[in-house]
Image (tube, helix red, strand yellow):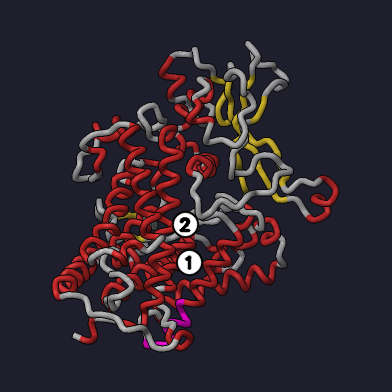
């Protein structure tokens, strides 16, 4: 079956695998460094409580069998080691079956983390990493010809990522149809980057061009992925360039880099590199396995494909507990106003009526200090910072975790404080913590030159009234984040 392999894509496969290994590395590293405060035994949403109420079949995970912080750390750091081995190309030095096991191990470990990660792991790029990571198991090492069916399954993932995002935009917010969403997006996106201020201040006609180009990239080019070469390569290259534009304009964890890797897997580099090296055919058992996996993915694709065609399209949803085939999308609604939650503490025994004595906690990624230029953190994922953005949109997003977060600040919990950039109470925790909502906007060029501030802010409302640790425990654990 000569059609079964695609040797011309040997370089595309190699680049794809290395980018995927690097993303795995960052994902496991983030899990290892952040889990104790988020989902650890003393975390805001402890894993033991979750697995006690959610059965294995709904959230398959190694931690359904047993959980301890030590075990989680071992899983996360094992994932780091596996990722480093794959990044170094160790899979190519092993027999085919052993290389497949090496690729399957990080997928299994990360699946175990995501399925108990709850709110903190509810992002679309978690499912994307798992879906892509599963397909990578069957791509084979550099000395075997890449299986054509797996390459087309990767294109099917890329199609859903791009086309799903394009459809949700057209269906979700009139500003995308009017080409005006980018008048707001660079300012109101979840976590701006160091260049986002400058993107926001681009001329408005250029923002219209950006929005129109986005529609072409996400609604037209995905269909060209399944056309003959070189058309498919050109379409994939444009998608990759568009994703690099997004990398420059914001912080979206590893979403953009995984999408770039998927786009690269569809590019035929032989016009540049020449004929591919001599590659062996995969053994029969591998071909049979690839056929079985392809059939499984096609069957599981029914619901995600139906979702794309539905007027009630949902985004970033998994239809199976293994996250094998998912639906994606982003920014179906674009905010016109940016709101941020400022978390403050005071050492006063009685909070002062004029608001004096309150000191603000600093976060790594989310805007806070007005003169601090946003930093570039992607593809690393700052989970707490992202959820703070959601909490500012609606208190409902924070109901499960914001109370425990405040309680741990009042307790001076070291693991929680490690998630923050600045702790204004290094010697002893505050007596009271409160949270207030501010409207943030970018300064103008003139304001930046005059004040050195990238942001201006104005008080909007109280999010959480002054709360102390010695209030009744039910109140301390779950204060109403709406401030009522």
Label 1: which residue? 170
Identity of the residue furthest to the right in this view:
450
Q: In the rendered structure, are the residues bearing label 1 and label 2 in contact, judged by CB atoms less than 8 Å apart?
A: no
Q: In this view, does 311 lie to the left or right of 334?
A: left
Q: Position of residue 338 (x, y in %)?
A: 62, 47
As for residue 295 lying within the magenta part, the answer is: no
Front residue of 431/440: it is: 431
Q: Where is residue 334 in the image (x, y as percent from the top left)?
A: 55, 56
Front residue of 234/349: it is: 234
- Is residue 475 placed above or below 420 in the rendered structure? above
Q: Image quarter for residue 20?
A: bottom left
**Neighbour tally class for label 1: few under 14, some 14-19, many 20 plus, Cα within 10 Å:** some
Q: In this view, does 350 lie to the left or right of 329?
A: right
Q: Is residue 288 left or right of residue 302?
A: left
Q: What element carries label 2?
A: loop
Front residue of 160/429: it is: 429
The residue drawn where x is 35% and y is 73% is: 155
Magenta stretch?
228-236
The residue drawn where x is 23% and y is 81% is: 4
Q: Where is residue 320 in the image (x, y as percent from the top left)?
A: 25, 54
Question: How far apart, in angstroms, are the residues tagged by discs 1 and 2?
Answer: 24 Å
Name the image quarter holding the N terminus. Answer: bottom left
Q: Image quarter for residue 438?
A: top right
């Amino acid at each position: 079956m000569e059609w079964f392999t695609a040797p011309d894509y040997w370089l595309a496969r190699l680049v794809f695998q290395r980018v995927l290994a690097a993303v795995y590395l960052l994902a496991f590293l983030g899990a290892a460094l952040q889990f104790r405060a988020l989902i650890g035994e003393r975390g805001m949403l402890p894993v033991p409580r979750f697995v006690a109420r959610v059965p294995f079949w709904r959230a398959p995970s190694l931690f359904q069998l047993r959980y301890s912080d030590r075990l989680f750390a071992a899983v996360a750091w094992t994932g780091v080691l596996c990722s480093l081995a794959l990044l170094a190309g160790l899979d190519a030095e092993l027999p085919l079956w052993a290389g497949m096991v090496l690729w399957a191990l990080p997928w299994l470990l990360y699946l175990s983390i995501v399925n108990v990660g709850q709110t903190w792991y509810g992002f679309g790029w978690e499912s994307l990493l798992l879906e892509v990571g599963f397909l990578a198991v069957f791509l084979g090492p550099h000395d075997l010809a890449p299986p054509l069916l797996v390459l087309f399954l990767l294109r099917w993932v890329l199609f859903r990522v791009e086309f799903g995002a394009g459809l949700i935009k057209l269906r979700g917010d009139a500003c995308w149809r009017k080409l005006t969403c980018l008048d707001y997006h660079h300012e109101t996106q979840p976590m701006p980057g160091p260049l986002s201020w400058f993107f926001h201040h681009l001329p408005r006609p250029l923002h219209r061009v950006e929005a129109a180009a986005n529609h072409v990239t996400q609604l037209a080019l995905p269909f060209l992925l399944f056309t003959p070469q070189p058309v498919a390569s050109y379409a994939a290259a444009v998608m990759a360039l568009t994703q690099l534009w997004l990398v420059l304009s914001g912080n979206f964890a590893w979403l953009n880099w995984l999408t770039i890797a998927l786009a690269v897997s569809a590019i035929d580099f032989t016009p540049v590199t020449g004929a591919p090296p001599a590659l062996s055919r995969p053994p029969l058992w591998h071909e049979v396995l690839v056929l079985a996996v392809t059939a499984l993915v096609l069957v599981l694709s029914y619901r995600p494909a139906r979702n794309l065609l539905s007027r009630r399209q949902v985004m970033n949803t998994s239809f199976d507990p293994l996250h094998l085939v998912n639906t994606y999308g982003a920014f179906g609604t674009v905010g016109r106003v940016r709101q941020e939650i400022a978390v403050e503490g005071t050492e006063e025994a009685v909070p002062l009526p004029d608001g004096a004595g309150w000191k603000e906690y600093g976060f790594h990624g989310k805007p806070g200090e007005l003169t601090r230029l946003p930093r570039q953190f992607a593809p690393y994922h700052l989970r707490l910072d992202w959820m703070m953005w959601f909490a500012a949109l609606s208190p409902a997003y924070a109901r499960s975790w914001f109370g425990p977060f405040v309680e741990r600040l009042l307790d001076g919990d070291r693991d929680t404080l490690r998630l923050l950039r600045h702790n204004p109470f290094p010697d002893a925790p505050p007596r009271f913590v409160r949270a207030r909502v501010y409207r943030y906007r970018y300064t103008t060029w003139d304001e930046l030159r005059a004040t050195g501030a990238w942001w201006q802010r104005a008080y909007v409302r109280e999010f959480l009234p002054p709360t102390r640790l010695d209030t009744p425990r039910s109140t301390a654990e779950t204060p109403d984040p709406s401030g009522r």
